[in-house]
Image (tube, rainbow, N blue to C red):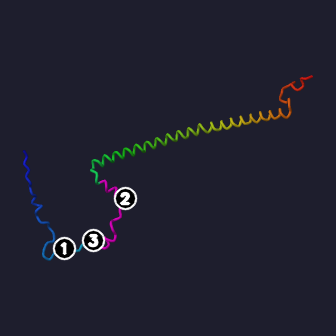
């Protein structure tokens, strides 16, 4: 069985060095190294910190092992995102240019085909109107004078 024994440190019991004596009064102490007076410190309030400063201060909360793991995870995620965005952009470019190269000639052909079909309808409508106005014009040879 293990027996524990408390060992006291002799240095902890010694008095701390500093100004000691009858003529020393803590109220008489003046800090000559300070550039700001007490009034300036109180009136200025806490030092201005940005949100970035505060977030960077939070990194000390995590142990170095977890910080390294988090950093490598974020780094690899960022790298994968950049690579995916790069390949996605290239793929989108290929699809877009391919669609334009195929769809523009197709659209031009469709418009030409519609124009040709519209002209054919107009020609048929004109032939029908001629037959109504002048009967026998479109009947063929010998149809009008075959009664003799």
Callout in the foreground (1, 3):
1
Q: Is residue 57 magenta?
A: yes
Earlier in the chain: of badge 3 and badge 2, it is: 3
Q: Secondary structure at mark 2?
A: helix
Q: Residues within 10 Å of mark 2 (few under 14, many from 20)?
A: few
Name the residue beneath numbered marker 2: 51
The magenta stretch is: 38-59
Q: Residues within 10 Å of mark 1 (few under 14, many from 20)?
A: few
Name the residue beneath numbered marker 3: 34
Q: Quadrant of the N terminus?
A: top left
Q: Secondary structure at mark 3?
A: loop
> Which residue is at a point 27% across and 50% down the rendered structure image?
64
> Which residue is at a point 31% across and 55% down the rendered structure image?
58
Q: Is residue 100 left or right of residue 132?
A: left
Name the residue beneath numbered marker 1: 26
Q: Is residue 35 magenta?
A: no
């Amino acid at each position: 069985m293990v027996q524990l024994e408390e060992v006291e440190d002799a240095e902890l019991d010694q008095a701390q060095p500093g100004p000691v004596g009858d003529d020393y009064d803590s109220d008489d102490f003046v800090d000559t190294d300070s550039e700001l007076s007490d009034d300036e410190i109180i009136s200025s309030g806490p030092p201005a910190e940005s949100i970035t400063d505060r977030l960077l201060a939070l990194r000390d909360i995590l142990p170095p092992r977890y910080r390294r793991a988090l950093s490598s995870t974020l780094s690899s995620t960022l790298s994968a995102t950049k690579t995916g965005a790069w390949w996605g952009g290239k793929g989108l470019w290929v699809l877009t240019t391919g669609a334009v190269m195929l769809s523009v000639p197709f659209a031009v052909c469709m418009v030409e085909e519609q124009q040709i079909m519209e002209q054919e309808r107009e020609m048929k409508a004109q032939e029908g109107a001629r037959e109504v106005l002048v009967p026998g014009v479109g009947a063929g040879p010998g149809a009008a004078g075959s009664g003799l």
